């Protein structure tokens, strides 16, 4: 039984090719994902900066 499985696996292999169970993502999709994350962080930081300007406790009070 074990020998039969080994023969079956030998027949399925392609010479000179590596069979991988997981396909790697393309460089373009990695780049787009990274750019989306970077710009989302930048927008979030811009929002935090605006919020700090509104709630700034060190700002001089109007008299």
Image: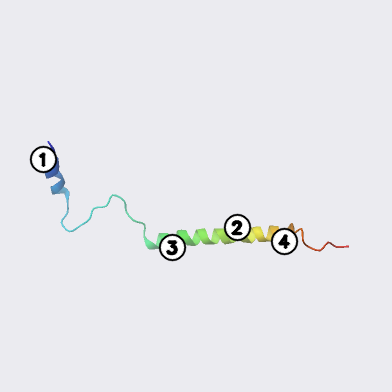
The span from disc 4 to disc 2 (Cα, nearest Å) is 14 Å
Question: Alpha-carbon distance for marks 3 and 1?
Answer: 46 Å
Q: Position of residue 2 (x, y in %)?
A: 13, 38
Q: Earlier in the sequence, mark 3 or mark 1?
A: 1
Marks 1, 2: nearer the viewer: 1
- Residue 9 appears at what percent x and percent y? 16, 46
The structure residue drawn at horizontal position 74% and vertical position 59%, both measured from the top left corner, is 56
Q: Which residue is mark 2?
A: 44
Sequence-wise, which precedes: disc 3 or disc 4?
A: 3
Q: Nearer the viewer, mark 3 or mark 4?
A: 4
Counting the numbered discs, the total is 4
Identify residue for label 4. 53
Label 4 residue SS: helix
Residue position marked by numbered label 1 in the rendering: 3
Alpha carbon distance from label 3 to label 4: 33 Å
Mark 2 neighbour class, 10 Å CA radius: few under 14, some 14 to 19, many 20 or more? few
Q: Secondary structure at mark 1?
A: helix
Residue count near mark 4 (Cα–Cα under 10 Å), binned few <14, some 14–19, many ≥20: few
Estimate the spatial distance between the alpha carbons at disc 3 and disc 2, rounded to whole Å.
20 Å
> Mark 3 packing: few (<14 Cα in 10 Å), some, or many (20+)?
few
Q: Is residue 52 left or right of residue 8?
A: right
Residue named by callout 3: 31
């Amino acid at each position: 039984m074990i020998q039969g499985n080994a023969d079956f696996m030998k027949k399925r292999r392609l010479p000179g090719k590596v069979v991988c169970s997981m396909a790697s993502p393309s460089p373009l999709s990695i780049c787009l994902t990274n750019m989306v994350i970077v710009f989302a962080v930048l927008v979030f930081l811009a929002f935090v900066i605006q919020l700090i300007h509104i709630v700034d406790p060190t700002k001089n009070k109007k008299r």
